[in-house]
Amino acid sequence: MLWQIIFLAAGILSLIYYSVICITLKKWDSTFSRFWLVLGGIGIFGSKWIGIHGMPCILEGLIGIGVCLLLISEIGIVSGMRPKTEKKAGENSAKWIIVLGAQVKGRKITDSLKRRLDAAYGYLSEHPEVKVVVSGGRGKGEDISEAAAMATYLERAGIERKRIVQEDASTNTLENLKYSRTLIEDCKSPVGIVSNNFHVYRGCMYAKRVGFENAFPIAAGCHPVLFLNYFIRECLAVWKLWLKKY
């Protein structure tokens, strides 16, 4: 039966991908990675169950709906990865960019955050008149705020301190933009939203919700092994964004 093969293949591939993540990062509980462990178990168990009981029509329908929703959200995420110039974002030139925070281990910048900061540094180097808000509070396992760690990184890279403004109270993406909005007077001029490629669409959406009229993405890369992992996780976050007005 086709569905039995699909479930079995999905289960095996999910377990293989989970193993690759664990081996690459030397961790079994990386962010969202256990999703693939669970999905692998469901796929293998579901294959055996379907072989005995057959595939219910209602389950086929739910899977179809889920796939459609997944594709719709992924189109939005992929559209955010495409580079956009300031001319597309608005007629005026950008005066600010905002770097969205990510986990800091103690005082150490993690891979995802480093990629965001390197993208921000590249933009700031090319646009010396632009200032930057580094946004992120202090969370579990962090000795300093994400904003402080980011500011230190950019200063050491050669960005003048007077160009860096710290927002160190936020705990999530919406708060990143909401609190950064209070630090930027001009909300009509373009503002660049710096984050990893899978995340920048949601960042720009939240930026527009809090009042930035011309938010445009500055997309950094992400760890290649984790791209699919983050891509699927971000899909769920986008659904939440669409369902909640604020």
Image: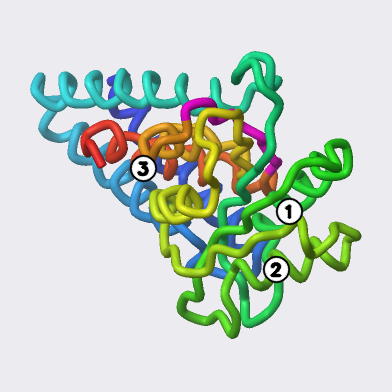
| Residue occupying image coordinates x 46% and y 19% | 75
Distance from Cα at disc 3 to Cα at disc 1:
23 Å
The secondary structure that most of the magenta stretch takes on is: strand
Question: What numbered label is drawn on residue 97?
Answer: none
Q: Residue at x 26, y 42 (%)?
A: 246
Residue 31 in the magenta stretch? The answer is no
- Which residue in the protein does label 1 denote? 117
From this view, report whether residue 68 is shown above or below residue 13: above
SS state under label 3: helix
As helix, strand or loop, the secondary structure at mark 1 comes to helix
Front-most of 194 and 65?
A: 194
Q: Hey, what amino acid is under mark 2?
A: Ile
Q: Nearer the viewer, mark 3 or mark 1?
A: 1
Residue 9 visible in the current orientation: no
Q: Position of residue 129 (x, y in %)?
A: 81, 41
Q: Amino acid at mark 1?
A: Leu
Colour logic: rainbow
Answer with mark 1 or mark 2, whichever residue precedes in sequence. Answer: 2
Mark 2 neighbour class, 10 Å CA radius: few under 14, some 14 to 19, many 20 or more:
some
Q: Is residue 217 magenta?
A: yes
Gap in angstroms between the C-alphas marked 1 and 2: 10 Å
**Mark 3 in CB contact with mark 1 (< 8 angstroms):** no
Q: Identify the secondary structure beneath mark 2.
A: strand
Q: Which residue is mark 3?
A: 237
Amino acid of disc 3: Ala
Asked whether the beta carbons under mark 1 and mark 2 sit within 8 Å of each other, the answer is yes
Q: Which residue is mark 2?
A: 109
Position of 202 relative to 40 (above/below): above
Q: Mark 3 and mark 2 in contact (Cβ < 8 Å)?
A: no
In the rendered view, would you say 125 is above or below 63?
A: below
Q: Earlier in the sequence, mark 3 or mark 1?
A: 1
Front position in the image: 28 or 87: 87
